[in-house]
Image (cartoon, rainbow, N blue to C red):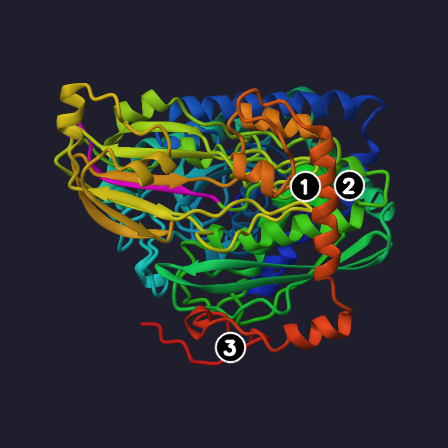
Amino acid sequence: MTANPLDLEEHLQVTPITISPSTMIEWTRPEPLSALARRCIESLQPGDYEIYDEKLRNFLEEAREVFVRSGVTGMLRAGDLIVAVYTANGDLANASAGTYLHCVTAMLPVKFVMSKYYGNPTVGVQDGDIFYANEARYGGIHNPDQMAFMPVFHGGELIAWVAALTHNPETGAIEPGGMPVTARSRHDEGMKLTPIKIGENFRIRDDMLDMMENFTSRAARMQAIDVRARITGCDRLRRRISELAADRGNDFVRGLLAKLIVEAEQATRRRISRWKDGVYRSTAFMDTIGPTSCLVRGSLAATKHGSDITFDFTGTSPENDGPYNCFPHITAAHAAVTMYAFQFHDLPVSNGALAPFTWIVPEGTVFNADPDAAISSSPMINSLTVSVVQQVFARMMFSSEDRPQVTGNICCQPCSPLVAGPNQHGVPVAELDNALLNTDGHGARQDRDGVDAYGFAYGHATRAPDTEDSELEQQFLRLYFRLRADSGGVGTFRGGTGTEAALVLWNVPFAAWAVYATSSYVPITLGVFGGYPAASAPGISVRNTDLSQKFRRGDADIPRDTIELATQRAIQGEYHFEHTNRPTRAGIEGDVIVATTGGGGGYGDPLARDPELVVQDIRDEAISEWTARTLHGVVYDPATLLVDHDATKAERAKARKERLSRGKPWAEFQAEWSTLRPAEHALTYFGSWPEGVANHPLERT
């Protein structure tokens, strides 16, 4: 144990270690302020907080850039990462985040180390130590998300922690890619590192790195390089915090970090207090568990009272024997993605913003599964969380001064192909196509359309990597990569469009591939206040094609979008139409993999959209003529795209009259609705209908 002149009880005040869901969710809240922290805050001089808050942001941005430039995997280069600084007891002070998910969860391994190992003579925490983790039961999201974290010492005193985290696309699981859709338990998911020390005296231990490469032998080079990248980014931030302590003193650093947390909590509570008290509810559905098409429900009742909010997920479907499960802290982290990006976007990225929140996540649901459950697809099941949280906040904020921040859902239907095997240079690679993942559509607002190809619902500062760079590194080239028409939800303002791509396995004799996605039948991405949800999409692949001959001949009929590919079939081969979520299978050179992302949710009644905006959408290929006529009720000349305003007004009046004719008194509607029931095969993982309670035992080995 490192000698520390500060009183341990006063300085740390971390809850005694008990690895349980309740402990993990409690750790997302700030620890009570110690007397030392209060004194350090009070010692800050006027202007110190404002000046050095900005300086700390610069430190974070510098470390993030170092991190990105040091690694090789696509998620890292796309910015799906964090670098963050924490107090000595593990509370999040601030972060530079491509994805806010990890800001929350990276606190938990730090708090675990402080609780379990700080005073442990066999481990300890010393200057120069390097820790590492990716185990969800100890605070992670799922196995591919790996974090390095280091203590920051100055003058023999522990004053802070720093962390760097990004997704690694290989874990040594039963399928390539780290997110095996056929996993039945945690034992199928590959490398699971509890928080461990992998280096001392600022040096990585070779035996620990060899162990990780052995676990991830499908892509060992990527693992080794990105472990070093995480530590490099981490250490750059550690150096900057140490330099600040040398310049201004340890108590100054403690006071600055603690004040960031206090300020975030106070500002969050002031904002919540502006919204109306009440209970706000939302429900969303997913249509797959692994390779099985089925209904799964996510339910949320948000009770807002004063400056406190309770999120109650009662009514959510039971845990399952696939990988679409998670633990409560993971659900909280996905909820925080929305909060940090929208409701509290202008506040420090600190867990002070989580202090007003209480979490009720019933045991045995997909959000609070058994410790032995497979959770490698936890981000996919938490598409439900992102959807329902956005919905309850939209309702909660609508009548407040924060109404301009309300949007239709940002796309909650992530889609990413994975291709694994030796690339054209003979190097083993297992990698996601992050260009698709990071070009989802944004939700519409009260006064404007959503952003096309905005980004990633979990990573608001991510970006699509250069597609030509991806083709040099990976085992495919693209037939097309473009905005996807009709993918955004229609409304008075439409959701931003997502993208679509056709990947061709190329310059390799074979490869393994999969697609991680949802919403072939039921969209998760919802609109608000009359706006439509985003579009769903099937999975399409074409095997044993004639593309090699077509390329050699220079044929001009290469399809330019998915509808053309599926309907005109200029490419010869075996066409397969299935769920967009597809487990790993083998492919050969020339095989085509079609993947599509979703758009954002719409805002407001589609019949209220400006007709001129509708025809502009047609010009921009954002919507089809069918959508313009059927959903927007716009009449126009197809040749000139000039609107017939009188005919449009009449068509919309007719549509509104038809709506009224379909209306029913509530009692009549409820009596009819309550007799309806989905087909039995759709309820395989739903639980009892309509309660969603577990009604059959699970078998895990």
In this rendering, the label closer to the viewer, 3 or 2:
3
The answer, for residue 600, to whether it is visible in the render is no
User: Where is residue 234 shown, x and y percent of the image?
Assistant: 49, 31
* Residue picked out by circle 3: 694
Q: Are marks 3 and 1 in contact (CB under 8 Å)?
A: no
Answer whether residue 561 is magenta in the image: no
N-terminal of the pair, mark 1 or mark 2, is 2
Residue lying at 54% horizontally and 29% vertically, measured from the top left: 238
* Residue 319 located left or right of residue 337: left
693 and 617: which one is in front? Answer: 617
Answer whether residue 422 is magenta in the image: yes
Q: Quadrant of residue 147?
A: top left
Q: Amino acid at mark 1?
A: Pro
* Residue picked out by circle 2: 262
Residue lying at 71% horizontally and 54% vertically, measured from the top left: 659
* Residue 353 located left or right of residue 134: right
Q: What's the distance in space between the residues labelled 3 and 1, CA to CA?
A: 39 Å
Q: Are marks 1 and 2 in contact (CB under 8 Å)?
A: no
Residue count near mark 2 (Cα–Cα under 10 Å), binned few <14, some 14–19, many ≥20: many
* Residue picked out by circle 1: 606
* Residue 254 located left or right of residue 321: right
The answer, for residue 234, to whether it is visible in the render is yes
The stretch of residues the image draws in magenta is 414-426
Quadrant position of the C terminus in the picture: bottom left
User: Where is residue 443 shown, x and y percent of the image?
Assistant: 63, 38
Residue lying at 78% horizontally and 43% vertically, measured from the top left: 268
